[in-house]
Amino acid sequence: MDVSLSLLIHIALLSSLCFAEDAYVFYDFKLSYITVSPLGVPQQVIAVNGAFPGQVLNATTNDNVAINVHNQLDENLLMSWPGIQMRRNSWQDGVLGTNCPVQPKKNFTYQFQVKDQIGSFFYFPSLNFQRASGGFGPIIINNRNVIRIPFAPPDGDIVILICDWYTQNHTALRTTLDSGGELGMPDGVLINGKGPYRYNTTLVPDGIPYESINVDPGKTYRFRVHNVGISTSLNFRIQGHNLLLVETEGHYTIQQNFSSFDIHMGQSYSFLVTMDQNATTDYYIVASARYVNESVWERVTGVAILHYSNSGGPATGPLPVPPSDIYNQWSAMSQPKSIRQNTSASGARPNPQGSFHYGSINVTDTYVLQSLPPLMIDGKLRSTLNGISFVNPDTPFRLADLHNVKGSYKLDFPNKPLGRTPHMDRSLINATYKGFIEVILQNNDTRMQSFHMDGYAFFVVGMDFGQWTENSRNNYNKWDAISRCTTEVYPGGWTAILVSLDNVGVWNLRVENLDRWYLGQETYMKIMNPEENGDTEMAPPENVIYCGSLQSLQK
């Protein structure tokens, strides 16, 4: 590209950002297919700028971010940025309810501000089961220099992406689901896009490339660990080293040590790890399947290497053992229930995070969202929330509103399970602007689930096994519950969250288990200011894509 043309484009992008006084960062993401063999079998994966996984998207609190996404795939594409709250700007959310897809050989520039945010997140393609083939990468939002972090600055920042993995690509997996089949056990677990170190000559073939993390003795590193997988909860551990939990999805935690940590689908955590061992050999980094029959799933284990600069030799011997509480559900749940917000630490602003006294705010609405195992609806295998299997729109919802497209959706999502015959529909939650709502995620499925809310962070105030009742509120944490955007919900159990609806737009609420999401286990919250004066929600961007009933408006 001509330098002057590039400069003009950057200036034009900057002028279209709504907070031009803040700093800005630009990225070009070219998504394409490449062939790699992470588990010893050549397969097609989705790369970002030729890399699998994709590069780090690095920004600082309040930066404006512009990402020009080029679709070099053979099918439509949308990129999603979960955890980025995009104040008043659901136009950039990257899911079908808010964006028309980017067609092959086209590009689209996402523009948003990471307003008052810090922390560890990741991006991924949201359409057509594509995340099962890659296209994901980490997001780091750094504190501004004037804001102290609640621990000594680490000696390095290390990103770890863990995920269950199939040697079939996303189109084959999608076909399996479309035909009513189950995906079955994954073929393995990847760490940073690579297969396991050959710790076992029977389970791991020779010649598989593995990840090796180089460290220096005595130093402390921040490990940002993300589960970007399809449907498997993973236990993360580093042989001989403690994991000091310090942050999850943009909020600092009370610091506590763990020997291993469960990371569920779509979740992100930061740990401080000090290199305090004698380095007689390298050490194993392990991500193994959790809440499954571990003897059957033994090969579904990711293994990387922690290599000290003064290491005496390669790692040998058995892997560090996983938690032994698999048959004690309440013991397993004690770990997520122990996560607490560090209310004495500042986040993105100088004032402490704990200045928001959520426990004293009156709840305006309660939603009980029940998930059940997939079932047949109109001859198709589908997943449901409150008996509704969501049907993706042809025209994004806010575009339909602005152009008076009638009948594109209903605002009648039930606030509790009604026992109606399960059906497919396009039903949204009619949420009240500035309401303070309680959402009960009731998992009556047989598998561990994660739920994510776009555009928001919420307080995880309670979780337990059994059916939620109003008496369950007596055990809520109303003082220092962690604020995050993705929470686990145990099979046969519930998780309660509280959220302040101060971000206008249409925001996706979904299960992060990719197969259940693909089969319809999602909805959207429509949050509009009844006194809208043009200042509350941003206008559609000038580069908005039109589709569906508005296709004729596309320039």
Image (cartoon, grey):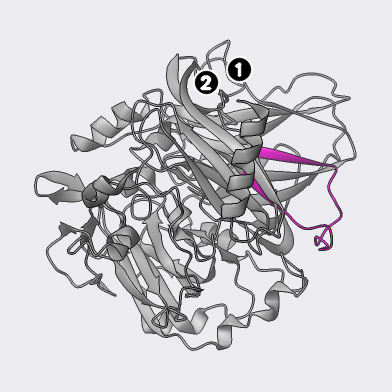
The answer to whether residue 296 of the structure is visible from this angle is: no
**Quarter of the image containing the N terminus?**
top right
Identify the mark at residue 44; answer none if there is no mark: none
Q: Quadrant of the image for the C terminus?
A: top left
Is 158 colored magenta in this rendering?
yes
- Classify residue 427 by image quadrant: bottom left
Number of the label disc, if any, that sits on residue 209:
1
- Packing grade of label 2 (10 A; few <14, some 14-19, many >=20) is many
Which residue is painted at 61% across and 29% down in the image? Answer: 303
| Rendered position, 60 above or below 278 | below
Q: Amino acid at mark 2?
A: Pro
Question: Under tag 2, what secondary structure?
Answer: loop
Q: Which residues are magenta?
A: 139-159
* Residue 264 to residue 319: above or below: below
Residue 529 drawn at (x, y percent): 42, 78
Give the mark nearest the N terminus, 1 or 2: 2
Mark 1 neighbour density, 10 Å: few (under 14) some (14–19) many (20 or more): some
| Residue under numbered circle 2 | 38
Residue 163 position in % (x across, y down) = 51, 36
Q: Say if mark 1 contacts mark 2, CB within 8 Å.
A: yes
> Label 1, label 2: how many angstroms apart (C-alpha)?
7 Å
Name the side, left or right, on which 471 lies relative to 411.
right
Question: Could you tell me which secondary element the residue under label 1 belongs to?
Answer: loop
Residue at the image position 55 percent from the left and 34 percent from the top: 29
Judging depth in this view, the residue of 314 and 543 nearest the camera is 543
- Three-letter code, disc 1: Pro
487 sits to left or right of 168: right
